[in-house]
Each structure stands twice: as C-alpha cells, then as structure tokens.
Image: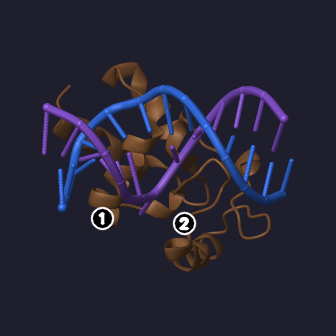
Chain colours: A brown, B purple, C blue
Amino acid sequence: MTPDEYVEAVLELVERIPPGQAMSYGAVADALAERSGRASARLVGAIMSRHGSGVPWHRVVNASGGMPPALAAEARARWLAEGTPLRQDRVDMRAAGWWPGEGM
DNA sequence: AGGTTGACCGTCA
DNA sequence: GTGACGGCCAACC
C-alpha cells in the first residue's frame, strides 16, 4: 500500500463514521492496520491536518475525546449540532465510540 | 544527511 | 485528575 493509498483509506474511513459518533486517531490507525500493515496515531493526525479539510474531521478525536485548542470551539459546535454524546466539552467515547462494521 | 515538529498514545509516577 | 517519557512516522527545515 503506497502512502497516497493510505491517505485515501484514512479519508474513506472517516467519511464512514456515522453522525453523532466518533473514532479516536488511534482507533482509525488501528482499524486500518489490518490491511495497511502499519498503525500510527501520529500519522493519522498528520494526514487529517493536511488532507482532512474535506471530511467530517470532528468525528475523529484524540484518546481523551477532545481536540487541540485551535479547533475545540468549531468541533464542539458540530458535536452539539449532531447530538454527539458529550461529557464536559469532550466526546464521551464510551457512548459515541464507533468501529467499522457496526451500524451496517 | 541530521534535527525538529506535530489534529497522537500507552505507561508510570 | 495532572505531568514526564518513550515510541511513533511523515513533513519540513
């Protein structure tokens, strides 16, 4: 799998996350590891930073259920808009956590 | 070629 | 709950 294909795979997966649910960067990396052979949360973060503008990036959060300060306000507004389970301005991953294969 | 940086994560204190 | 550390891997000096 080439780097470009990996980017595509990440964006595809993010687009499949249902509204009101979320995955962590690590979960995305983990889910793709099966067919990409590599897993790096940091790499997924870098990809989202560079190519994430066209996908529902607010459905990908860090392991704590939050986002860096620069994006926290925008992300919170979107979570509220689609009814994502929150807990103190962080996504409640216990309730909102999603994995490819569910809901299909 | 080597050093830093970053939308990250698990572990240990 | 917080903070330090090491591992991670591509992008960018």
The residue at 53%/39% (across/down) is A26
The residue at 66%/55% (across/down) is A65
Q: CA distance from mark 2 to mark 1?
A: 19 Å
Mark sitting on residue A54: 1
Image height of B3 relative to C12, above or below = above
- Mark 1 surroundings within 10 Å by alpha-carbon count, few (fewer than 14), some (14 through 19), many (20 or more): few
Image height of A94 relative to A34, above or below = below
Q: In the picture provided, is A6 more to the left or to the right than B6?
A: left
**Which residue is the site of mark 2?**
A68
Q: Which image quarter is the N terminus of chain A in?
A: top left
Image height of C4 relative to C7, above or below = below
Q: In the picture provided, is A90 more to the left or to the right than C13?
A: right
- Mark 2 surroundings within 10 Å by alpha-carbon count, few (fewer than 14), some (14 through 19), many (20 or more): few
Q: In the picture provided, is C5 more to the left or to the right than C12?
A: right
The residue at 74%/64% (across/down) is A86
From where the camera sits, is residue A104 visible? Answer: no
Name the chain letter of the residue that bears numbered label 2.
Answer: A
Name the residue type under label 2: Pro
Q: Helix, strand, or loop for circle 2?
A: loop
From where the camera sits, is residue A71 visible? Answer: yes
Mark sitting on residue A79: none
Q: Nearer the viewer, mark 2 or mark 1?
A: 2
Name the residue type under label 1: Gly
